[in-house]
Image (cartoon, rainbow, N blue to C red):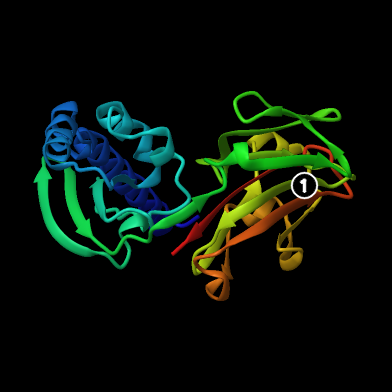
Amino acid sequence: MSRRAAAILVALVALVAVVETGSALTARSRVATDADWEAAAAEVRAGFQPGDVIAFAPAWVDQIGRAHLGDLVTVEMAGRSDADRYARVWEVSIRGAHAPDAKGAQLAHQSEHGRVRVALYDKPATPVVYDFTASAADARVLRGTQPCFGDPAHGWLCGGTRVERRTLEIDYRPRRGLLVPADRVATTLAYGEVSLGENLVVYAGMHDYYARLHGSGLVDFSVDVDGVEKLRTRIGNDDGWRRFDLDTRALAGTRHAVTFHVSAADPAWRNFGFHAEARR
């Protein structure tokens, strides 16, 4: 190596050291303090109304946000599939991040509390006509043609597996829904006399990090309305919390039988979860 090249290398190393030192010295000043979070939380509490949702951004700050506003963040809110049912979005954020829940909404107000930003957004709320997770008691659960035994509070025993309502971990986020461990024999959740709206929204995905790590099989998932297939798909580890919109405008305002079918040719570690809502 020439003397010139060696000198350039030494200068670059010195520059990196200076930058890293400066970054370390200023890092503390860029971090939101407890006082910042408490001030932001006080503003949200003062204006929060029924029908509002609180969204934290970026997503990894969710646990910090709930430590300060957990009294307002219900299980249903924390495990929501989307914010469509909510009329107002309180976005609590740091570092210029924005929550997907506020996308397309109208900014009504914003303020800064040190390093924490609070923004209130208005948007149209989509009424939910029927929530299949909340109404799990209406479901008849079968494994093949054999009925499973149990109830929504404790889950249904279906052979060696348990179907239950719970907060799922899908795509590294909490998701409220129904856990249906997939088997070679189809598990069916049959709802009768469901009031439908213009849209049947279904979310589906693979529950549990370790199950996704150890299993790779695809889950067959289908939805019938009055015995007519409206959706047939396969869900795998890479699908995240996948959304399907089924057009039910022709059935809006009337009651119908809605059935969900879950199975897998390779059922090892296939902890399947789904959530569905009939929306106006």
- The residue depicted at 48 percent of the width and 50 percent of the height is 81
Q: Residue 102 in the image: x percent, y percent?
A: 30, 58
Residue 247: tell me if it is visible: yes
Work out whether residue 19 or residue 89 is closer to the camera in this orientation and state it.
Answer: 89
Q: Residue 188 in the image: x percent, y percent?
A: 77, 47
Numbered circles on residues, count:
1
Work out whether residue 200 or residue 10 is closer to the camera in this orientation and state it.
Answer: 200
Vertical position of residue 157 compared to residue 101: above or below: above
Q: Residue 179 in the image: x percent, y percent?
A: 66, 38
- The residue depicted at 10 percent of the width and 46 percent of the height is 112
Question: Which quadrant would residue 163 be assigned to in this image?
Answer: top right
Per the image, label 1 sits on a secondary structure element best described as strand
Q: Quadrant of the C terminus?
A: bottom left
- The residue depicted at 26 percent of the width and 52 percent of the height is 89
Which residue is farthest top? 154
Q: Residues within 10 Å of mark 1 (few under 14, many from 20)?
A: many
Q: Residue 154 in the image: x percent, y percent?
A: 64, 23
- The residue depicted at 19 percent of the width and 38 percent of the height is 26
What residue type is disc 1 on?
Thr
- Is residue 57 shown left or right of residue 168? left
Work out whether residue 36 or residue 67 is closer to the camera in this orientation and state it.
Answer: 67
Vertical position of residue 224 compared to residue 37: above or below: below
- Is residue 170 shown left or right of residue 97? right
Residue, disc 1: 188
- Is residue 87 shown left or right of residue 244? left
Residue 212: tell me if it is visible: no
